[in-house]
Amino acid sequence: MVDSIFEKRGLLEDIYKQIDETAKLLNLSKNTIAKLKSPERAVVVSCPVEMENGEVRVFTGFRVQYNGSRGPYKGGIRYHPDVTLEEMIAMAALMTWKCAVVNIPFGGAKGGIACNPLEMTRKELMRLTRRYTEMIRPIIGPEKDIPAPDLNTNEDVMAWIMDTYSMVNQYTVPGIVTGKPKCIGGSEGRKEATGRGVAIITREISNMFFGKPVEVAIQGFGNVGSVAAKVLSDFGFKIVAVSDYYGGVYSADGLNIDELLSHVEKEGTVSTYPKGDKISNKELLELDVNLLIPAAVESVINSENADDVKAKVVVEAANAPITYEADRILNERGITVVPDILANAGGVVVSYFEWVQGLERYFWKADRVFRELEDIMISSLHEVLSVSKDKEVDMRKAAMMLALKRVAEAHEARGLWPQ
Ligand code: GLU
């Protein structure tokens, strides 16, 4: 049985409400608002794949380039049954704001394929990835649009994209993707970057709010949640609950994350970990803890459960885990939310480092990656906090103000073409 909390609603509508609200605070012109609300390009492709049993299945894929005013389009590719064009547009907008908040020279994009990778073999996934790459090839490129991993995609998928693109171009193009294996130009620290960035932001916020590491509940134990759990426990935080697609586990004394990681390696889920009480995803989100980190999918905190959240601070490790309405409710209840476009930006920050290393063909050591990641995360946090203080707005509005101001500035500086 899968928790019904994994549900998506009105994501794009929420994005547009946030743009309107922020544009008002920034006093942006009507023309600029119209630009900010329009995805620049969206392609829908169909990808026929011969499955292991000989049957041909046709999958629908997307790539949306939301805004390129600040640089080449950048964003992940996700494989999930619920992938839709609307979701991709919303996520591509979020990528635009995310790159702007941490001030890296990229625009925003997102792609995905509606498929269930849990039910597909490695060979089927490879064929699907290669066909999808070929279908979006005209609009991607190391100077145009650079994909990366996202939900249910990983460095293997990036290697297949890189290889397909390179074979067709007849030379190796490492800069076509980030988040690829190190043996073909992947950066040190990229795999852990999103989770590490979440942990850094959580540590800073926790020091500000509580003066010390406190107890944390984490929803999602994939590439983001599991790394955040590990790094936070190394920082001295007590991880009292974690969960995944199948359910979760709770221990008031704190979970041993190293043990839990080896359990997941063997069993494929945290939900069967024996040293703790079973807990559902819904219950995890409602735990009485100081810090809550939703690190799974979007809209898990919505108008139906926002009143039941008891955490004092929520750090958004997933993209858009809190709906617009739920965000309003949490705000009213005095709960601090650290927004996704800041909290989970570590992934794209190290993607930027990987891209730069690929262009220069000069590779950094891990300690440089971690040091520069930490610098960007902490300085961006302080920029957001200072806007929040000056303008007397919550952290999401502050982050949106910083982001939209930077995107609008770039757009206005470039002007329209043709005139
Ligand atoms: N998929 C990640 C995100 O949502 C990383 C994107 C990237 O590195 O381009 O931020």
Image (tube, rainbow, N blue to C red):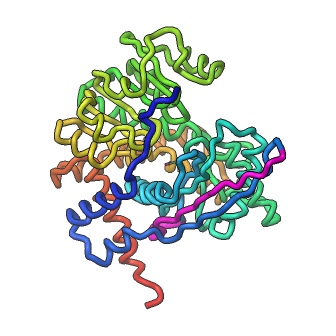
Residue 305 position in % (x across, y down): 29, 34
Residue 91 visible here: yes
Horizontal side of 417 relative to 122 (left or right) equals left
- Asked if residue 68 is among those painted magenta in the image, a careful observer would answer yes
Q: Main secondary structure of the magenta part?
A: strand
Q: Is residue 396 above or below residue 176?
A: above
Residue 226 visible here: no
| Magenta region | 54-72
Residue 177 position in % (x across, y down): 64, 54
The residue at 31%/56% (across/down) is 400
The residue lying toward the viewer, choosing from 257 and 284, is 284
- Asked if residue 346 is among those painted magenta in the image, a careful observer would answer no
Q: In the picture, residue 154 is in which quadrant?
A: top right
Residue 285 position in % (x across, y down): 35, 28
Instruction: Give the farthest residue toward the bottom.
Output: 419
Horizontal side of 243 relative to 61 (left or right) equals left
Locate the C terminus and report the quarter of the image it occupies.
bottom left
Horizontal side of 25 relative to 245 (left or right) equals left
Numbered label tally: 0
Residue 340 position in % (x across, y down): 39, 45
The residue at 31%/52% (across/down) is 399
Instruction: Give the farthest residue toward the front.
Output: 55
